[in-house]
Image: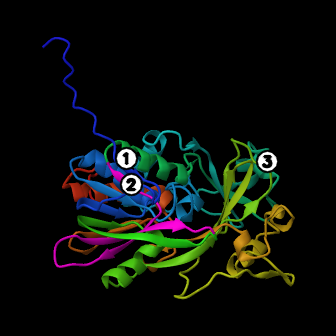
Amino acid sequence: MAGMNTAAPSPEPGQVWAHVGQPFTPRPYDVVVLGAGRMGSAFAFYLRQLAPHLSLLLLEEGGLPNEDGATLLAPGVWTAWGVPGDRLAQARWTRDQLETAFGNISFQTRPLIELFAQAGEDRVSSADALAPHPDALAMVDVSALPFARVDAGAATYRPGALALAAAQTAVKAGADLMLNARAHAVPDNEAGGSVVIERLSVTNTHQIVVHETHRLRAETLVLALGADGPHAAEHDLGVHTTHARAYRQTPRLNVPSRDDTPTLRAAGLTLRPQNGGFTLIPAVHHRDPHGYVPTGGHLTGVPTGLRRETLEDLVALMDALPPLGTGALGLGRSISDIPGAWLALPGGRADGLPLHQTLSGGVHLLLGGPHADTLGLVVAHDLAAAVAGVAERPWVGGASV
């Protein structure tokens, strides 16, 4: 009929439970996601696109999905460096998604310049590479780091903004979201499993308490709990994994940066221009042992908030990057003074790639880790497609990960 709108109706938005004052009645879901950081929210985002008929509940222990944790402190640096050759197409697809799929997440093409003491393949003069960027050149002793390589296609963005945008879009597309809810997977004899949800509230003395507890079933459970995911798999489900975690701090270097300042890297340390200065992303060398408690180190006998390993790395670079040896580096006095979070290490490796792993029938572990900026969205999409029963993959080659 002329003038008739034949487009499919938009889905009803999902329910959001932000606090315990909003009553919740448990019901079964097709899919429940534990954790609404970048990986969990991205999974929900893609699952609503691929299988809008599946009911979906996204659970987050904190407040908004970009408020704290490893997602908020992630570097937000996309680069093809370090990506295996057979996954470059997936990395490029991720870059396109970052630029186009999530709205304003401050995506910006920004060169990444890595500095070296020795010559090597694809390396040019540091002075020449830094010449177009006087502010970055002023930070480097090019006699100590005379060689460089440049990734002109690198980019920066805000992972916390991505998590928030993905979760909001999923809710608009019909997913339910519960905040301030601590969740535990419970195995049972059927496919999928049950989830115990503890709704949290804060007392007048600022203590976090369990206000009420619920239990519900789901055909599919996804543990997207970041560094806590492997522990949850073992403690809650009795499934041992090879994954590990490390505590990474992101100190501040208060040296001016601009919108066109490149990202710098030297000896594994990344200097990411952000908020008019630099956020330092130290290298992760190894897993931290079970039971490790982060503590600050000492510099010339003075206690600092930087853990010893990070402090040693920065001291080793102070001659090559002179601002690190000045008061511009935020050392803090205790561990609480320096932003830090536990980072998942897939496979227990400091260079582990993002992955998803089936723990039991219908229960999956979803991990980002050190390369989540570049390949995390691919892995979240791949799991969503598997849950949705979709064989095709949008990146070149079509293979699952």
Residue 183 visible (yes or no)? yes
Rendered location of residue 273, percent (x, y):
69, 51
Q: Which mark is residue 177?
A: 2
Q: Which residue is mark 1?
A: 171
Please tell me whether residue 133 belongs to the stretch shown in magenta: no
Q: Residue at x 51, y 73 (%)?
A: 209
CA separation, marks 3 and 1?
Answer: 42 Å
Nearer mark to the viewer, of 3 and 1: 1
Is 320 placed left or right of 93 in the picture? right
Residue 111 higher or lower than 308, as above or below: above
Badge 2 density bin: few <14, some 14–19, many ≥20, Cα 10 Å: many
User: Main SS of the magenta segment?
Assistant: strand
Between residues 377 and 54, which one lies in front from this camera angle?
A: 54
Of pointers 3 and 2, the one earlier in the residue sequence: 3
Between residues 343 and 36, which one lies in front from this camera angle?
A: 36
Is the Cβ of the residue at disc 3 closer than 8 Å to that at disc 1?
Answer: no
Nearer mark to the viewer, of 3 and 2: 2
Q: Secondary structure at mark 2?
A: strand
Q: Quadrant of the N terminus?
A: top left
Residue 230 higher or lower than 252, as above or below: below
**Range of the magenta residues?**
175-204
Is the Cβ of the residue at disc 2 closer than 8 Å to that at disc 1?
Answer: yes
Rendered location of residue 33, percent (x, y):
34, 62
Q: Which residue is mark 3?
A: 135
